[in-house]
Image: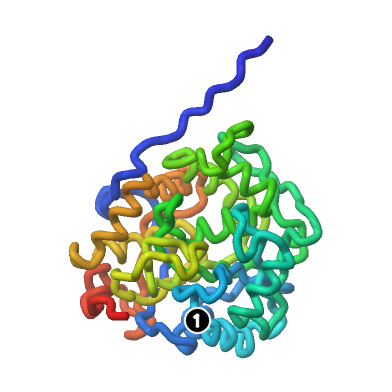
Amino acid sequence: MASEKIIIPGSGGDRYLPYEQRQGNESIVYFTRDLSAKGLKKLYKRINGKLSGKVGIKLHTGEQNGPNIIPRPWVQALVEDCLPDAAIVETNTYYEGDRYTTELHRETLKVNGWTFCPVDIMDEEGTVMLPVKGGKWFTEMSMGKNLLAYDSLLALTHFKGHVKGGFGGSNKNIGIGCADGRIGKAMIHTTPGSDDMWDISDEEFMERMTESTKATVDHFGQHIAYINVLRNMSVSCDCEGCAAMPVVTPNIGMVASLDILAADQASIDLVYALEEQDHADLVERIQSRHAHRQLSYMKELDMGNDRYILVDIDNGDAHISLKDAVKDVVPFTD
């Protein structure tokens, strides 16, 4: 009888890799401090060149009345002015809550005001397996079937902390958010046969989630783009809704890129560039969950670059340092 293959997770997810220690090519990351509908539209226009056909907007629509999600009026303005034929795309949750079933999910969408455009709960009518190229945990991942109905995808992500992932950026938004609520999310979170649905953690969890993301990213090819909104960055995910921990990290701005790794890495770097007293809670959440493994594993899977040029679209497309980008942030006030 053949022995079962033993898979070993990577390491180092609790350690931040400074920019000067990274190697490889650089991608372009656009940055704005303008946290508004206008700022969002301006940023979107820098990365929308290859979004064609039927566009899905992968957005975390949040639990009922969650206080930290991307403001609905911003997204409405983006859709109405730039993406009039797009749909918001989501999947049902793995945990029992306001979005556990399609019926509950639809009611929550109404409560949170996501009624100005179609919202496609992609696993409402079943699932589909997409290949995971080069993965070590999976050869395929179970997704909401309706993902296949879209030609392009915009990952519009509220960047924040996360109780399991350490941080939730574009990688988490896609990797967890496109996996269907029963099969795909279980593949990422739970060892088969375990009575603890959340038993997979640390580097192994980051790798499983990233392999799920890779399946979607590879599916869309060049027809995918990423925006991270660094606002109301609780250490808690929007999954926790009104129970989320209070926000103490200053608002920074928004980043956009055609490179998922560069977008998430720049978001992390901007947080680390804050003064220690301003980023301590979020950094602790990131490092204690070994979340840097999201970034190093994306690089190992050739999903992008962890080096980038930060382009300040507020100031004539100047190339700026991380310290310059955050030098005028003010301590968060409720």
Question: Is label 1 in a helix, a strand or a loop?
Answer: loop
Foreground of the two, 220 or 271: 271
Q: Is residue 108 left or right of residue 226?
A: right
Please say if 120 is above or below 4. below
Q: Along the line of sight, which residue is nearer the eye, 81 or 240?
A: 240
Provide residue 144's location: percent of width, then percent of height. 72, 57
What colouring style does the render use? rainbow
Q: Is residue 228 visible?
A: yes
Callout 1: 10 Å neighbours few (<14), some, many (20+)?
some
For this orientation, the residue located farthest to the right is: 125
Q: Nearer the viewer, residue 81 or 20?
A: 81
Q: Residue 176, image x and y in percent?
A: 57, 54
The amino acid on which the numbered mark 1 sits, given as a three-letter code, is: Pro
Q: Position of residue 79 (x, y in %)?
A: 62, 84
Quarter holding the N terminus is top right
Which quadrant of the structure image shows residue 276? bottom left
Quarter in which the C terminus is drawn: bottom left
Residue 267 in the image, given as x and y percentages of width and height: 37, 64
Residue at which label 1 appears: 71
Q: Is residue 218 visible?
A: no
Residue drawn at 67 percent across, 45 percent down? 141
Residue 146 higher or lower than 201, as above or below: below
Q: Is residue 13 left or right of residue 188?
A: left
| Residue lying at 54% horizontally and 61% vertically, measured from the top left | 173
